[in-house]
Image: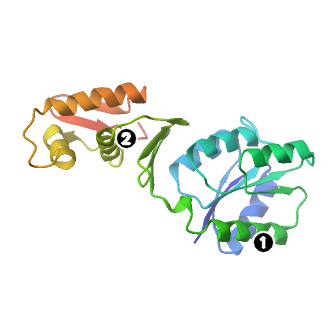
Amino acid sequence: MSKILIIEDEPDIQELLAVYLRDAGYAVVTAGDGVEALEKFRKERFDLVLLDLMLPKMDGFDVCERIRRESHLPILMLTALEGEQDQLRGFRMEIDDYVTKPFSMPILLQKIRAILRRTAGGTEDRRCLRYRDLTLDLDGMEAVLAGRLLDLTTREFALLRTLVASPGRVFTREMLLAQLWGYDFFGDERVVDSHIKNLRHKLGTDYIETVRGVGYRAAKENR
């Protein structure tokens, strides 16, 4: 079942869209402003975004730009603006299609189906791991933090992936050496500390906690 993120600030329109798309067989998640939308985008996997242009806190263009920094997720933009410049701006930001309000629900549904057919089996089938403002593309071996692509070595990426995949779990140095360096590694355990130090520097955010005398962990997200 395809999952759609509806970003619409008008409650009546949001509810209408959600009910209609659920009846059409889609899973639906809603957001009422740009900030909430980005939070949900980073926490869950979606197949398409239905994005209203006029939003509180952060407008649809800003939301679109931030999503595009991290993903090629299909975007269908909704707007009450009919100006050509606004539509061209949206296409320059790589939206997939445009619908002007008021719109026909059956036509909207057909546009959604057409976009999903075009993107089936595309880049959004890539496996991603999200933690707070961090997105890890597990297939592309790329890490993006708040829209910024991190320059990580293969070992640093693997170390970060191991920690954020299990928030709150403490990994000893021995565990990390066994998983990431291999059981036949006979070097100094402090190589783990060195990699953690470099990783923290590149993140610029202390997502990795030291558990004194034991090892390291990624903090639970609700802390």
- In the image, residue 191 above or below residue 24: above
Check disc 1 and report its element: helix, strand or loop: helix
Check disc 2 and report its element: helix, strand or loop: loop
Q: For the C terminus, give its image quadrant.
A: top left
| Residue with the mark numbered 1 | 110
- In the image, residue 170 above or below residue 96: above
Residue 32 on image: x %, y % = 71, 47
Residue 22 on image: x %, y % = 68, 70
* Residue lying at 43% horizontally and 40% vertically, measured from the top left: 222
Which quadrant of the structure image shows residue 3? bottom right
* Residue lying at 9% horizontally and 36% vertically, measured from the top left: 187
Amino acid carrying label 1: it is Gln
196 relative position to 113: left or right: left
| Residue with the mark numbered 2 | 220
Front label number (2 vs 1): 1
- In the image, residue 29 above or below residue 56: below
Q: For the N terminus, give its image quadrant.
A: bottom right
Which quadrant of the structure image shows residue 56? top right
Q: Nearer the viewer, residue 103 or 92?
A: 92
* Residue lying at 20% horizontally and 34% vertically, measured from the top left: 192
